[in-house]
Image: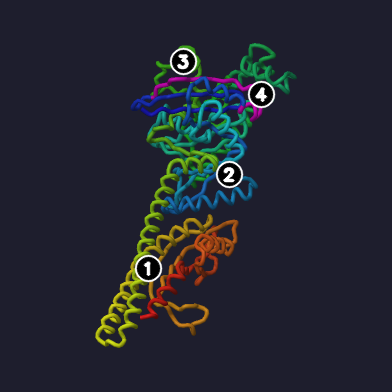
């Protein structure tokens, strides 16, 4: 049974849901609301300490929204996943360069691609913002799995507890205190998602300004007396109620305009000017405002209702007080529900934002140790093999020397001299064969390891070849003749946005020379930079990793 945990980190309230999936049913185990004592990010981070009340919550997803999170769309041709990752990584690096700060990013494919192009949703968040939230949640409830944009969580909540009708376009809006998450979907496929930097707080600010009271008092007046249902005009219970309600009409129009702009943006993004939702469903704490659904229905000419998730949810295992609070207004928990339900759901749409430092630690913990162990074993085995063969070669060299002495002593005896001379030739042949068979494989393995250790980010290796044969002793001076040796040829491309091609290549060459003293490495081919958007430069490097061995073999052969 998959267990999911979702933390909706709102400006005024944190909401936590712990769920357990049993087939098509989602059992709710905990449903908690935590008030935030303040109105800034520091207050939100401080409140996460109270998330410990849900118990051990490692692996939770938490929501992100607002100005530190950006959702954008890009169209790419159908390509292999690794190539798509490369293209999008380059785009994110360019965004980070423009933003002037590191960005964490993730992506997923959405519907609405044009022709043979695929539409990709790319979500990015500032690293410092994400790091702070990761650290706060870690202290309060355990190591989180990831952050997820609130709009993506809203889509997952609808896929869990919403009603799907074939061919119907549905618009969702979750209204928080400072942000509103907007989603368009059709037939269970996400078409569009974004976050708006405005929420229920604009109604409180308007009431505070008109009534001349503080924000907390204005929030209470908004909930108790406010009513923006067009049918309620002229029939308010009191003059004070009318004044409060009229103060809220301006922000209501502002919210309707933002939703209308989002719809226009979605039409342009999908290339479908006729895209129109069959209904609008609103959720979140701000959706509880009296008359808001009726106002938006009138302003947008789209049927509008509250999204109160109930289908497929089992609240029987909730503590009694939490069950009553959840069932009083389930729509407040929509974002937390989408975050928790994403764990283990086949139809979940996931965009997981993780800081670079956390990704690096997880990658090392998951497979880095085993890769290093495998590399050490491989290098150790190759080293032992090389040492063994070099020992044999040394033995043969010793035998060659002994045979030479015997040959010199047997010059007077022609028959014995010829036999010893033949033995020298046989041993030399065995030595050449042994070196030729082992040095090529060892050069290939060692060369691949040196390239892996020395290639900086942006350098991609396409081919590594090892060849043994007669080559020029000095490529710059053909008059010196040739010698039998093993040469390594490395071909690849440099793809970089903000690093000079020559700098990246020189860094790799210097790294190989530093890790293999005596190695002779040079660039034998280099193409001109090419490619639109992401620049690339092709290159071919030639390396002689064992020049001393070639000289030793040549000396031994010269003594034949």
Q: Residue at x 51, y 81 (%)?
A: 477
Q: Is residue 465 above or below residue 251?
A: below
Distance of mark 1 from mark 2, alpha carbons? Answer: 57 Å
**What is the distance, in whole Å, between disc 1 and disc 4 at their CAs?**
78 Å
Q: In this orientation, does residue 258 appear?
A: no
Q: Closer to the N terminus: mark 1 or mark 4?
A: 4
Q: Position of residue 275 (x, y in %)?
A: 48, 40
Q: Provide the residue span drawn in magenta.
A: 26-45
Report the residue marked by disc 4. 38
| Numbered label attached to residue 394 | 1
Q: Which of marks 1 and 2 is in front?
A: 1
First-in-chain label (2 vs 3): 2
Give the mark toward the camera: 3 or 4: 4
First in residue order: circle 1 vs circle 2 = 2
The residue tagged 2 is 103
Q: Which of marks 2 and 3 is in front?
A: 2
**In front of the other: 547 or 530:** 547
Q: Residue furthest left?
A: 415
Residue corresponding to mark 3: 323
Mark 3 vs mark 4, CA separation in Å: 27 Å
Number of numbered tags placed on the structure image: 4
């Amino acid at each position: 049974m998959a267990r999911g945990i979702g933390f909706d980190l709102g400006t005024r309230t944190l909401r936590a849901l712990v769920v357990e999936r049993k087939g098509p049913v989602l059992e709710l185990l905990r449903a908690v609301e935590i008030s935030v004592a303040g109105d800034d990010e520091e207050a939100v981070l401080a409140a996460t300490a109270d998330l410990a009340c849900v118990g051990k919550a490692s692996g939770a997803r938490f929501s992100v929204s607002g100005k530190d999170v950006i959702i954008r769309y890009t169209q790419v041709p159908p390509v292999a996943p690794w190539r798509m990752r490369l293209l999008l990584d380059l785009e994110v690096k360019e965004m980070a360069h423009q933003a002037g700060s590191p960005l964490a990013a993730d992506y997923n494919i959405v519907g609405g691609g044009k022709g043979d192009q695929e539409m990709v949703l790319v979500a990015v968040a500032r690293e410092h913002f994400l790091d702070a939230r990761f650290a706060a949640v870690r202290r309060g409830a355990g190591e989180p799995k990831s952050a997820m944009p609130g709009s993506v969580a809203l889509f997952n909540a609808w896929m869990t507890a919403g009603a799907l009708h074939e061919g119907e376009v549905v618009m969702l809006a979750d209204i928080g205190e400072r942000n509103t998450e907007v989603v368009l979907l059709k037939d269970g496929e996400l078409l569009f998602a974004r976050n708006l930097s405005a929420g229920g707080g604009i109604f409180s600010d308007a009431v505070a300004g008109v009534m001349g009271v503080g924000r907390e008092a204005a929030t209470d007046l908004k909930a108790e007396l406010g009513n923006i249902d067009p049918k309620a005009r002229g029939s308010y219970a009191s003059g004070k109620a009318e004044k409060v309600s009229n103060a809220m009409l301006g922000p209501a129009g502002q919210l309707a305009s933002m939703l209308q702009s989002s719809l226009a943006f979605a039409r342009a993004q999908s290339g479908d000017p006729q895209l129109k939702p069959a209904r609008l469903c609103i959720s979140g704490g701000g959706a509880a405002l009296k008359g808001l659904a009726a106002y938006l229905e009138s302003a947008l000419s789209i049927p509008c209702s509250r999204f109160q998730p109930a289908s497929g949810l089992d609240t029987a295992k909730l503590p009694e007080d939490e069950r009553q609070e959840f069932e009083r207004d389930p729509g407040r928990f929509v974002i937390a529900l989408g975050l928790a339900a994403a764990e283990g759901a086949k139809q979940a749409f996931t965009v997981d934002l993780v800081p670079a430092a956390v990704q690096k630690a997880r990658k090392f913990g998951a497979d880095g140790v085993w890769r290093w162990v495998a590399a050490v074993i491989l290098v150790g085995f190759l080293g032992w093999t090389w040492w063994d063969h070099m020992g044999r070669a040394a033995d043969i060299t010793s035998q060659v020397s002994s045979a030479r002495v015997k040959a010199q002593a047997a010059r007077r005896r022609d028959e014995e001299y010829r036999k010893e001379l033949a033995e020298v030739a046989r041993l030399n042949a065995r030595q050449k064969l042994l070196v030729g068979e082992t040095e090529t494989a060892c050069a290939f393995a060692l060369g691949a390891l040196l390239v892996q250790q020395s290639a900086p980010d942006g350098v991609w290796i396409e081919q590594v070849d090892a060849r043994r044969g007669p080559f020029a002793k000095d490529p710059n001076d053909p008059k010196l003749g040739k010698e039998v040796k093993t040469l390594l040829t490395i071909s690849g491309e440099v793809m970089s946005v903000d690093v000079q091609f020559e700098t990246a290549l020189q860094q790799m060459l210097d790294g190989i020379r530093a890790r293999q003293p005596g190695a002779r490495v040079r660039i034998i081919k280099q193409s001109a930079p090419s490619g639109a958007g992401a620049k690339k430069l092709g290159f071919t490097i030639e390396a002689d990793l064992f020049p001393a061995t070639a000289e030793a073999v040549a000396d031994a052969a010269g003594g034949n």
